[in-house]
Amino acid sequence: MGMFWWMPFGKVPEITAGELDALRRNGKAQILDVRTGVEYRSSRVPGAVHTPITDFGASLATLRLDKTRPVIAICLSAHRSIPAVRTLQKEGFHHACQLKGGMRAWWQARLPVASDEDRENIDAGTR
């Protein structure tokens, strides 16, 4: 991939939090969270799969993403997702884009989030 594939500079296609939520609700989006594990576990877009940007190149093949469906990359503020989108495009994902403004925009729009704490609460309630 080269030494500087991860540089968070330049422009890539983007969608808004509202647009992503609509795609998410109708099952058309593949949501890829490239933040750290701690960030992902604490608050994420429901249905997102996780791979940190530091592992992205090595783990892309294991994610089993569908090249014919939109893939939306997410990070905290739309910087780490830039190299993810570029890599996806290079690998033939023609409908790859990032969440404009990242998770900060998602939270600001007050859209639903999931967390590992939610999972723990569900598990505790079923015991």
Image: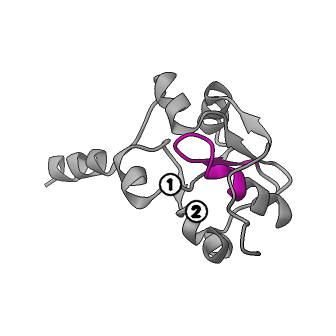
* Residue in front for this viewpoint, 70 or 37: 37
Residue 57 point in image, percent of width and height:
67, 72
* Disc assigned to residue 73: none
Coordinates of residue 26 in the picture (x, y in percent): 65, 35
Q: Residue furthest top?
A: 109
Q: Earlier in the sequence, mark 2 or mark 1?
A: 1
The stretch in magenta equals 70-84
| Element at label 2 | helix
What residue would you read off at disc 1?
35
What residue is pinned by disc 2?
53
Query: Are the residues flagged by discs 2 and 1 in contact, CB closer than 8 Å?
Result: yes
Furthest residue to the left? 127
Of the residues shown, which amino acid type is indicated by label 2? Ile
Q: Is residue 30 left or right of residue 42?
A: right
Crowdedness of circle 1 by 10 Å Cα count: few (<14), some, many (20+)? many
| Residue 2 inside the magenta-drawn segment | no
Query: From the image, which quarter does the C terminus lie in?
Result: bottom left
Residue type at mark 1 is: Arg
Residues at marks 2 and 1, CA–CA distance in whole angstroms: 7 Å
Q: Nearer the viewer, residue 53 or 88?
A: 53
Q: In this rendering, does residue 60 appear at all? A: yes
Q: Position of residue 72 (x, y in %)?
A: 68, 46
Residue 71 is inside the magenta segment: yes
Residue in view at x 66 percent, y 34 percent: 100
